[in-house]
Image (cartoon, rainbow, N blue to C red):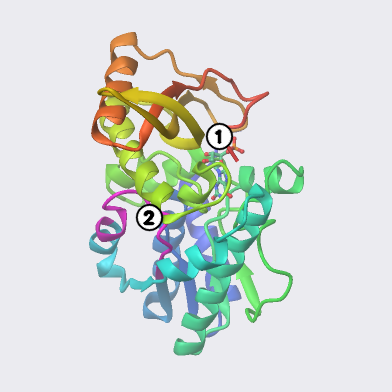
Amino acid sequence: MAMNVDRFINDAISEIQREVKGRAIIGLSGGVDSAVCAVLAHRALGDRLVPVYVDSGLMRQFESDRIEQLFKQLGLVRVNVQDRFLDALTGIEDPEEKRKIVGETFIRVFEEEARKIGGDCLIQGTIYPDRIESEGGIKSHHNVGGLPSTMEFKTILEPLRDLYKDEVREVARALGLPLEISERMPYPGPGLAVRIVGEVTREKLEIVRRANAIVEEEVMKFKPWQAFAAILGKATGVKGDNRVYGWVVAVRAVTSRDAMTADAMELPWEVLRRISSRITGEIPMVARVVYDLTPKPPGTIEFE
Ligand code: XMP
């Protein structure tokens, strides 16, 4: 069933005005969902809305500065809490536990910011598939199943809760958001934490961030649904004349319509070969690069 975009926009703005009496915080990650939500909430509330960008240290290369730049006209507040996230994640290997820690840390930061402005409402860009995957027990998306059981917020408002990603993009275009936002590929809220299989460390974050930048540089022109790098573990390799026991980087590029199912992308062999030689050549501690061929199901898009 086709969505009536204009009606959706008007209804969402009315809902926000009805539900929010005082001031509200919106968690803005720079992705299309939270950006659409922020523009709708800004239209509804004006400067009673404070968009908060949490620099968790789990973001891609150059991302935080880019987002600060893009949204400064909405009065964006940037909170730098990289160490807090890393400390909370130290020693944690289980993916669901990692998501819950990330979800809780986000909420605590939002609560602190809400206290500063005297607001008790949190607006989030949660969309329909986030809820389905969390409720179906597949993954506790950090902004749904990963939320802590007690929160200071009186209201949590999710204006995009019934939309699929392609519908959110339609709304983004109708709102006049720039292409780099409306067409931006999805990125998970827990970010690089779910692209490091096992414990998150500073070293692994640095490596996966650099590898990811290479994958994006080489693959985005093929218009994947998502393309990224992840760290799987360690393996033996040889560089120059020396044995290295280095990291195994997985490259994943998928096509999809709504993230509920996905297929591995058939990238040209020379592109895969260039990605492999760039990652092992430009990042000293990487010993191997593998390409993930698994569709969803039985795989998922992210590794954790
Ligand atoms: P999976 O890995 O379940 O991912 O196939 C489906 C889509 O959801 C994204 N994803 C997340 N997004 N919080 C999010 O905001 C999360 O915890 C999360 N986990 C996965 C993933 O990137 C893909 O687009």
- Point out the tag, 1 or 2, that comes first from the N-terminus: 1
Callout 1: 10 Å neighbours few (<14), some, many (20+)?
Answer: few
Residue 266 x/y as whole percent = 43, 13
Instruction: Judge whether residue 63 is colored magenta.
Output: yes
Which type of secondary structure does the marked residue at label 1 adopt?
loop
Count of marks overlaid on the render: 2
What is the three-letter code of the residue carrying label 2?
Gly
Residue 77: quadrant of the picture: bottom left
Which residue is more in the foreground, 268 or 182? 268
Residue 28: quadrant of the picture: bottom left
Which residue is more in the foreground, 61 or 131? 61
Residue designated by label 1: 2
Residue designated by label 2: 30
What is the three-letter code of the residue carrying label 1?
Ala
Instruction: Judge whether residue 178 is colored magenta.
Output: no
How far apart marks 1 and 2 lie (CA) works out to 26 Å
Is 110 placed above or below 286 here? below
Foreground mark, 1 or 2, reads: 2
Q: Would the CB of label 1 be found within 8 Å of ligand 1?
A: no
Is 170 placed above or below 190 here? above
Name the quadrant where ligand 1 sits: top right
Instruction: Name which residue lies at 56% across and 83% down.
Output: 21
Question: Magenta segment, which residues?
Answer: 52-66
Instruction: Name which residue lies at 23% across and 62% down.
Output: 69
Question: Can you see residue 31?
Answer: no
Residue 148 x/y as whole percent = 68, 68
Residue 271 x/y as whole percent = 29, 16
The quadrant the C terminus occupies is: top right
Which type of secondary structure does the marked residue at label 2 adopt?
loop
Residue 133 x/y as whole percent = 68, 43
